[in-house]
Image (spheres, helix red, strand yellow):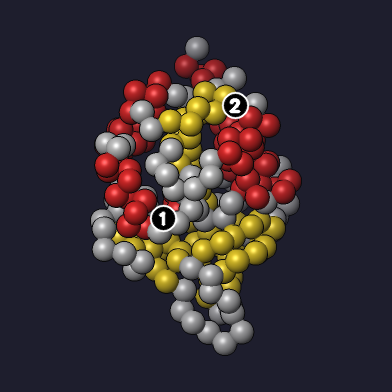
Amino acid sequence: MPTIAVVDYDMGNLHSACKGLENAGATPRVTDSPAELERADAIVLPGVGSFDPAVQHLRSRHLEQPIKDAIARGKPFLGICLGLQILFESSEEGQEPGLGIVPGTVRRFRSEPDITIPHMGWNQLQFTQPDSPLWQQLPSHPWVYFVHSFYVDPVDPTVRAATITHGSQTVTAAIAHDNVMAVQFHPEKSSTSGLQILANFVQLVATRQLSKV
């Protein structure tokens, strides 16, 4: 049973993410300890709120470098919602530099007639990496739950694992590159498909553990 560090930096309720990971067979550990991040088999970075406070809280707890080090060592990593956005270099929402793990910018949705901002509710994923481990055993266009006014715009389009369309805008909904995966939607609020995504991540971590034995 893999141990997954769920990063606590005062940016959202962690209970539902932990429950989803538990249901998938993992042992989640809510923590702001760099030592715990190092010991864990994988890291989940959830988040709800604004870009600047999120990166400020991570840095005030001295978590930025431990997260970067864990990713550099190949530890599986899953970002959720704001936990996706702060992986990027900058955001139109604030002034703080992001973690810069993924080159690119977080952008604001353009205002259009007949679309709501924030983008809130259910939307269908369009897979751009259909063979990604995150998407195993899912239907081809699963419905997942979003709450966001900003979206990520990676420099390298090949890191996109899925997109959505909101109004006339098609934007990145998930990224995946090597051991780094992150989603804009909330898998813990996305019913069966969301729980399957969390289960897929746990299975990936468990498989990696077995390969080290």
> Mark 2 touching mark 1, by CB under 8 A?
no
Dot 1: within a 10 Å radius of its alpha carbon, few (fewer than 14), some, or many (20 or more) residues? many
Query: Which residue is drawn at the image coordinates 45% and 53% (left, top)?
Result: 82
User: Farthest bottom residue?
Assistant: 113
In space, the residues marked 2 and 1 are separated at their CA atoms by: 25 Å
**Residue 212, x across and y down, in percent:** 47, 16
- Report if residue 203 is visible in the image: no
The quarter of the picture where residue 20 lies is: top right
Q: Is residue 123 left or right of residue 147?
A: right
Which residue is at the front of the view, 179 or 16? 16
Residue type at the position of mark 2? Ala
Label 2 belongs to which residue?
26
Q: Which residue is mark 1?
A: 85
In the rendered image, the vertical position of residue 21 relative to residue 170, given as above or below: above
Q: Which mark is residue 72?
A: none
Say which label, 2 or 1, has the lower sequence index.
Answer: 2
Disc 2: CA contacts within 10 A as few (<14), some (14-19) or many (>=20): many
- In percent of width and height, residue 70 lies at 35, 31
Q: 2 or 94: nearer the eye?
A: 94
Q: Where residue 81 appears, x then y in whole percent?
A: 50, 53
